[in-house]
Structure formats: structure tokens, C-alpha cells
Image (cartoon, rainbow, N blue to C red):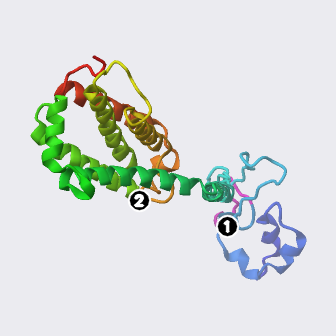
Amino acid sequence: MTSQPNESHWRRPDDSAAQTQVRPASASLVDPEDDMPSANYAGDFETTTIPHYSASTDAGNARRVGSGFGLGGQEPLPYIEPQSSDRHSSFGADEAATDEDDERVRAAGRRGTQNLGLLLLRAGLGAVLAAHGLQKLFGWWGGEGPTGFKNSLSDVGYQHADILTYVAAGGEIVAGVLLVLGLFTPLAAAGALAYLINSLLADISAQSNASAFRFFLPGGHEYELTLIVVAAAVILIGPGRYGFDAGRGWARRPFVGSFAALIVGAGAGVAVWVLLNGANPLQ
């Protein structure tokens, strides 16, 4: 049996002559309805059609290609910008911060003998205060001891002299030791400032003519005034690098806290005099 007469009748419109010649003879036995192209026919293998995109169109407008399943056009995947630039920028910021910290360390090391001078100023004031406190509390180095210190406070007009004796002498020793160590320097210097202000007011009140203020020794007050200036300077400039406060903010860059400590120390000295003595030292 031959399939040539019927072969031309069931040929697809886009089949070439070469394809017709190589088609097997058994193709005429297939039901003609099974071999008809579908309405949305897109090629010989319509169920495996691969969508393609035009290179000249934008990334957001894809060329719509029909599929055997009737699906719409394929949209391109969204473009994700690589994050390498952000990582590089963050790494650059970290490196800049590290370089800035290194520059601060190098700048701190270029201060020459400044930190050594701060050490001498701070430790010298602390040693003087600690030695005077030990004289008052234990009578060392020719000191008057606690009894003599209590009597001197009572003579000046302080109330509660028995308690104030140990508070004042103990506070003087503690402030001196902290200054020598460079530990809690603003607070220690503020306590020393309060004590020195009271000492100055007591000396002025104890002199025969309090209204005649004298500066030079032996009857003047240059010693107390000098220690007051040193204590205020230590509060404002900080302890320096040679101390336990070297890593704290008030050692690297004292500012607001130092002003606050200065005001608190001076105010505490005046307040103690007013509350426990109440006399006008200039009368």
C-alpha cells in the first residue's frame, strides 16, 4: 500500500519537500486529527519552546513569546546591584577611624615633658596634703596630733570639732594619696580645694586684724593661696598620662567635668565654713 496520494493532503503548511521525503511510510496510519497543528502552534516542538529576549530592548521590557501551555511573556529577573562597593566603603571608614585613633596616640606621645610636669604638679600637691593629714591625725613629724587639731578647730569657731577633726584629717590623707596615684583625680583635687579654702578662711579669721589681708609670710597667706591655685590647676588640666586615670576622659581631654568639679570643690569649701562656723572671716 502507498501513502503518496494522502501524504500531500496532511502535510503541514511549513513542511518542506525534504521533510516530506524522509517521513516514514507509516505516518499515513496515524489519525489525521492527532497530526493537526494547535491554534497557538509555535514550532515543531511546541511544548519545549525556549523564550528568548531581544538584546536591544530594555531590561524591564522582555519580548513576549508564546508557549505551548499558553503562558504569557517571560519577565527578566530583577537586577541586584552588587554590594562589594558598600563593603569597601565600610572597610574604608573603619580604616579611617583606626588611622584617626593612631594619630591621636601619636599626638599624645609628642607632648614631650608635659605629662611629666603634670605628674610633678599632681604628686607634689598630694604629698603635701598627705603629710599634713598624717601630722594632724598621728602627730608625726612634729605635728599637733588629733587633740591639738581639735582644739585649734574649736578656737576658730567650728562646731562639732570632735567629728570634724577626723573627717578633715582623714579626707586630707585620702585626697593626697589619690592625687599621688592619679586616681579619681578631679574628685580628689576638688576635695583638696574644699579643705584648702576652709584652711584659708580659718587662718584669716584667726589673725588679730582680719580686715587687713596680708599675702606674704610669715603672717600672710601666700602658702594657702598657692596650694589653692595648684589644686584648681590640677582639676582643669587633668592628671596626665602617668597615673591610673590615664585612660579616662578627664585625663585625655578635660572639659565640662573639670569645670563642674572646680565649682563643686569651691562651693563645698564655702558651704562647710558657713554651716559649721558661720563667722565672717573679714570682721
**Residue at the image point whose x is 16% and y is 47% from the top:** 166
Left or right position of 122 against 13 = left
Question: Of 102 and 282, which appears nearest the observer?
Answer: 282
The C terminus appears in which quarter of the rendering? Answer: top left
Mark 1: few/some/many CA within 10 Å (<14, 14-19, 20+): few
| Tag nearer the camera, 1 or 2 | 2
**Residue at the image point whose x is 51% and y is 57% from the top:** 241
Write down the quadrant of residue 100 in the picture: bottom right
In the rendering, which numbered label is found on residue 83?
A: none
Asked whether 41 falls inside the magenta stretch, the response is: yes
Left or right position of 156 against 48 = left
Left or right position of 193 against 141 = right
Q: Is residue 69 visible to the viewer in this orientation of the structure?
A: no
Residue type at tag 1? Thr
Tell me if residue 158 comes above or below residue 210 in the rendering: below
Mark 2: few/some/many CA within 10 Å (<14, 14-19, 20+): some
Q: Secondary structure at mark 1?
A: helix
**Residue at the image point whose x is 18% and y is 36% from the top:** 153
In the rendering, which numbered label is found on residue 48?
A: 1
Q: Is residue 129 visible to the viewer in this orientation of the structure?
A: yes
Image coordinates of residue 254 in percent, x first then y, are 49, 43
**Residue at the image point whose x is 39% and y is 49% from the top:** 185
* Residue identified by numbered label 2: 244
Asked whether 87 falls inside the magenta stretch, the response is: no
Q: Which residues are magenta?
A: 33-42
The N terminus appears in which quarter of the rendering? Answer: bottom right
Image coordinates of residue 86 in percent, x first then y, are 65, 54
User: Which is the main secondary structure of the residues drawn in magenta?
Assistant: loop
